[in-house]
Amino acid sequence: GTDGKQARRTRSSSALGELFDHGCDSWVCLFLAGSMFSLLGNIYTMVALVFLLAYWRSPTIFMKPLLFGWSSAAIFKFTLFSSLYFVHIPITLWNIIRTCPNKQPWHRGLGLWGVVRPLIPAGLLIFSSYIWAYYSPSNLLEKNTRTFLFCCGTIASNVTVSIIVFCRLIVAQLCHVPAPLHNKEVYLFSIITVVICFILPINKDTSIECIVLHLITSFVTLDHLYYAYQVVSTFYFHT
């Protein structure tokens, strides 16, 4: 972000600074999303208010209806999703293929499995978090929304940091070795999801699920900070 540009402008950038720059960026996404639903809420009141105001505006100022009776919000939503699937993703794939050096295969000789490997921990985390939110015995996502988001966001940041920011993926590609696959936080979260949702008989009125969520959130936060300490120590003793 801005701090990285400032460091490069003043020629004070370092490998450790770049790592922490990307590491903070991967964690700050959590707080950006949390601030949005903390401000607007996770109920449909705000959506309903915007919808009613949009249709109250039309007859009041004699505005003609938009295409096929759609509101401006519906057109904006359609444009946003269409650009994601038909513009951003194809252009990203095209840039990856086009920038391969010397017309080499885009997987750099690692094969399709070597490319998909880094996506497996993130995919497992997304799947597990969806299962826990959907099959939660005590409707955990509604009662502890911020804690649940903080837990999943911290694990996602750890997956990103341990695979990308610590240069393991980059080094693996340069050395033509497989990228790292395992992440203990993702495995722990997935196991707890299965146990809570499908094995333990938890009633809706009990607080056991909330206690488990707070415990795993505390663990992943401390583990994430300890990993950052390990990164600093490694660079300090090798530079």
Image (tube, grey):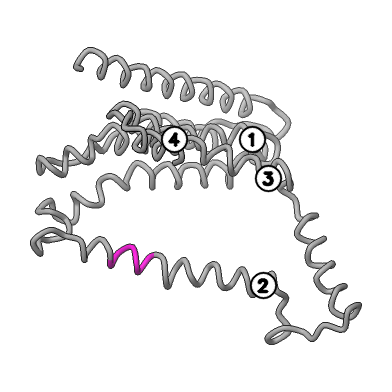
Residue 105 position by quadrant: bottom left
Type of the residue with mark 1: Arg
* Residue at the image position 29 percent from the left and 37 percent from the top: 163
Q: Residues within 10 Å of mark 4 (few under 14, many from 20)?
A: few
* Residue located beneath label 2 in the image: 74
Choose mark 4 or mark 2, whichever is in front: 4
| Quarter of the view holding residue 189 | top left
> Which of the image's four quarters has the N terminus?
top left
Between marks 4 and 3 in the image, the one whose residue lies nearer the viewer: 4
> Gap between marks 2 and 1, in whole Å?
28 Å
Q: Say how many tags the image has.
A: 4
Asked if disc 2 and disc 1 are in contact, CB closer than 8 Å, the reply is no
Q: Earlier in the sequence, mark 2 or mark 1?
A: 2
- What amino acid is found at the position of numbered circle 3 in the picture? Phe
- Rounded to the nearest angstrom, the CA distance separating label 4 from label 3 is 27 Å
Q: Secondary structure at mark 2?
A: helix
**Range of magenta residues:** 89-94
Q: CA distance from mark 1 to mark 4?
A: 28 Å
Location of mark 1 (residue):
146
Coordinates of residue 130 in the picture (x, y in percent): 52, 47
Numbered disc 4: secondary structure: helix
First in sequence: mark 1 or mark 4? 4
- Depth-wise, is mark 2 or mark 1 nearer the camera? 2
User: What residue appears at the point 44 percent right and 38 percent down from the top-left corner?
Assistant: 26
- Our reading of the magenta stretch's main secondary structure is helix
Q: Nearest the camera: 150 or 20?
A: 20
Circle 3 residue: 37
- Closer to viewer: mark 1 or mark 4: 4
- Going by the numbered disc 4, the residue's amino acid type is Asp
Query: Which dot marks residue 105?
Result: none
| CA separation in Å, label 3 and label 2 | 20 Å
